[in-house]
Image (cartoon, helix red, strand yellow):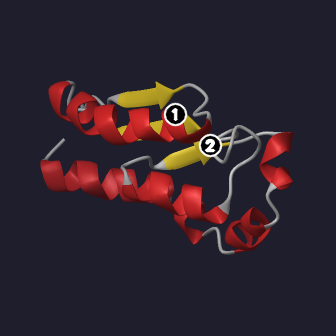
C-alpha cells in the first residue's frame, strides 16, 4: 500500500512567514519525503489576506494547495487568480501523477 506524506503548514503571516517557508520548506520536504504540502496562506500579504503575487510565489516555493478564509478577499487581485483556478482543481490529480511516477 502506498503512503502519501502530507505536510500542513499553519497560517503564513507576512514577510517573516513567507521567509520561513522559503528557508525551511525545501529541507522539510527532503528530510521527511513530503509528497504534498497544504498551507494556510490567509495572512501572507502583510498579515491581512493574500495577494496574487504571494499566492503564485508560495506555489513556486513548493506549496501545492493554499487554504484561506474570509480575509483572502482583503486583496482584490486574488479574485482574478481564483477565477483561473485550474491549479487548485487539478492539485489532487497532479499529486497522484507524481506518486505514480515515483512508483508509489
Q: Where does label 1 land, which residue?
A: 17
Relative to 83, 58 lies left or right: left
Distance from Cα at disc 1 to Cα at disc 2: 7 Å
| Residue at the spot 36% in from the left edge and 49% down from the top edge | 62
Q: Write down the quadrant of residue 93 in the picture.
A: bottom left
Q: What numbered label is drawn on residue 100?
A: none
Percent position of residue 22, x then y: 36, 42
Q: Is residue 35 visible?
A: no
- Does residue 33 appear left or right of residue 48 in this picture? left
Residue 31 against residue 67 in the figure, above or below = above
Is residue 102 toward the left or the right of residue 94 in the image? left
Work out whether residue 37 or residue 93 is closer to the camera in this orientation and state it: 37
Q: Is residue 72 visible?
A: yes
The quadrant in which residue 29 appears is: top left
Other residues around mark 2 within 10 Å, as few (<14) / some (14–19) / many (≥20):
many
Contact flag, marks 1 and 2 (Cβ < 8 Å): yes
For mark 2, give the secondary structure.
Answer: loop
Q: Which residue is mark 2?
A: 44
Q: Give coordinates of residue 94: x percent, y percent.
A: 39, 59
Amino acid at each position: 500500500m502506498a503512503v502519501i506524506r502530507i505536510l500542513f503548514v499553519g497560517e503564513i503571516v507576512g514577510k517573516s512567514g513567507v521567509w520561513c517557508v522559503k528557508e525551511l520548506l525545501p529541507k522539510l520536504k527532503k528530510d521527511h519525503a513530503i509528497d504534498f504540502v497544504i498551507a494556510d496562506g490567509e495572512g501572507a500579504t502583510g498579515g491581512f489576506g493574500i495577494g496574487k503575487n504571494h499566492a503564485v510565489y508560495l506555489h513556486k516555493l513548493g506549496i501545492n494547495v493554499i487554504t484561506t478564509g474570509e480575509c483572502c478577499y482583503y486583496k482584490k487581485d486574488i479574485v482574478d487568480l481564483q477565477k483561473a483556478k485550474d491549479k487548485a482543481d487539478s492539485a489532487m490529480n497532479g499529486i497522484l501523477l507524481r506518486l505514480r511516477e515515483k512508483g508509489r
